[in-house]
Amino acid sequence: MGRGLPKLDAATILRAEEPYIMKQSRVPQSSLTIIAVSLAVVCTALGPTRAAFAGNKADGDPGDQAAWAQMIALNQKAIALIRARKFSAAKDALLEALVVAKDAKLESSEMMARTYVHLAAVYVTGEKNRDKGVTQFALALKIDPSITMTPELDTPALKSAYLLARRQATASAGSESRPTPAPSPPTEASESVPAVAALHDEPAAGKGEATTITKRGRGGHKVAVVVSDPDLPAKVPSPLYCPLPFEIPPGQDLIVRCITQKQQKKATATFYYRSEGAKSEDFTLAMMRRNVKGWLQATIPGDAIKGKSLGYYIEAHVPGSSEALMLGRSDSPNVFMIRGAADAAAKSDNENILDTLKVRAADEEDARRNHRREPGAIWLSLAGGSGIVGFHSTESLDGDSSLHSVAGFTVATPFQLELELGYQWDKSLSLSAMGRYQHATADSSGYTGRPLLTSAVAAYLRARYAFFTSGAFQSYASAGAGGGNNFLIVIAKQCNDTNTCVLTHSDTIHGGPVGILFGAGAIYHLNRTFGLFLDVNEIATLPKFMALTEVNLGLSIAFKFEKTAPVVNDEGVMEKPPENDAPESPPDEAP
């Protein structure tokens, strides 16, 4: 396991400040010299043996050690994230650790088993998926049968899933280790089909009653199988004892046997099961009958064993006791993982994520290198610029309403400010709210009429979509709508050479009240926080139809906040989140 890598327990994983690689640096130089000489002698003596493993990496390979250290770091990170209730990020870190193990051929290492234990914590505590949690514990126990739970993550629900996985794994291992009994002669009902060996998942049988079940042959056809019923155990280890496998084959009848510690000849039991996809309350009832050997027994038809799993619970009653003996419950059933389908599900959850992780890693690396905003970031921008040209229909002037300006194009006001607050929805789309202020200088010497407008204010909701990206550079299109005065078009003072004035003062025409905005622009990200941008917009107003083309230059500032979710314990009580994401550092060792 791990090809010479160190044995780890949960306590080692929790020592975030002292991963295994760092501990090696504390070995004295004299000790290193002795170790090097000893290794040289051992390698010489074992030369022929090592040649047989030429296809594997050597013990202590730097690549192994680097992968081992990376797996430790990822598991430490996951523990901190689980404690902070950031389960999605914890799952990503653990899945990445599985990929590292696979690439380094450390699938059978103890660190791989520990990763499965932490994935079980994500599924049970975070996603409330007990079935997946049991599967992850089973994978861990398959690698290291002595593995225990990580104390920092222990909860009643997680412990229950762990104990179930251990119980089922032990039952499965015990049944597989026993010799397969010789097949009994087929019954009359099965004379037309060939008899095959008894099920390997059944306990060892003695002389007595045999049960005929149906299973599928290699070609998918159904065949009869004669299974001899085992003797009762000399000592029943629990109030309700049911030797059950962890995995079952699809499409094959399943025999379930149970026995109680007390009142064995008078106790009764019922087996409840439901196929994958059935409603939570749709359990099928199977009464357990007492066979010749004394087992309470029921046979589950193979047609019900399909999909990834089969949920079940068992309820037994002992005369003289008012409380039922339960193995699982309707609201929290136990699970048989269906062989093949369960493997595919685990592979889908764990091993087939390599491509997804590579794409995600490539996106993150690209964003780090080119400093673009992260999805989920809040950004604020301030831009200033000028209107280039405006178009207006024939409208009365704002100051002197007795005068009208003929429809046409007019030079717009020279200055506007735009303040915008936005949210980066994903790597391309952002949504924002923008406030616009425009200033117009009035030439009103000698004018005594109605006060002239010198400013316009409007607000818009806007969406931007980046349609081209190259490095830190992005170009985008935008659209939005809003309301207000929107903008002003200035009508200049109009006098001829003889100082005869048609318009003795400058005046304005304002648009609105509804404004529609279309635009395009480009932004260069200096880093993940700051960016410089050029924005070109076309604003049109209704029902007074006017249009304005404007150009702005601006600076944007982006922030991303990681909010820690509230911690709710297994009793439903909200607790204060941990102060830090990382586990507490261990105390300094004495010199």
Image (cartoon, helix red, strand yellow):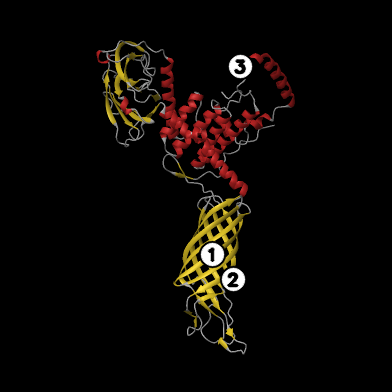
**What kind of residue is marked 2?**
Phe
Q: Are marks 2 and 1 in contact (CB under 8 Å)?
A: no
The residue under the point 54% across, 41% down is 359
Is residue 215 rendered to the left or right of residue 5?
left
Q: Element under label 3?
A: loop
> What is the CA distance from the residue labelled 3 to the residue labelled 1?
72 Å
Q: Element under label 1?
A: strand
Q: Earlier in the sequence, mark 3 or mark 1?
A: 3
- Residue 537's label in the rendered image is 1
Mark 2 vs mark 1, foreground winner is: 1
Q: Is residue 327 above or below residue 489?
A: above
Count neighbours of disc 2 (C-alpha within 10 A) and say few if under 14, some if 14 to 19, many if 20 or more.
some
The residue under the point 44% across, 25% down is 166
- Residue 415's label in the rendered image is 2
Residue 507 on image: x %, y %? 54, 80
**What kind of residue is marked 1?**
Asn
Residue 106 on image: x %, y %? 56, 27
Q: Element under label 2?
A: strand
Q: Earlier in the sequence, mark 3 or mark 2?
A: 3
User: Can you name the residue that lies furthest to the left here?
Assistant: 188
The residue under the point 36% across, 26% down is 250
- Residue 52's label in the rendered image is 3
> What is the CA distance from the residue labelled 2 to the residue labelled 1?
14 Å
Residue in the foreground of this view, choosing between 572 and 359 = 359
Residue 590 on image: x %, y %? 67, 32
Q: Is residue 366 visible?
A: yes
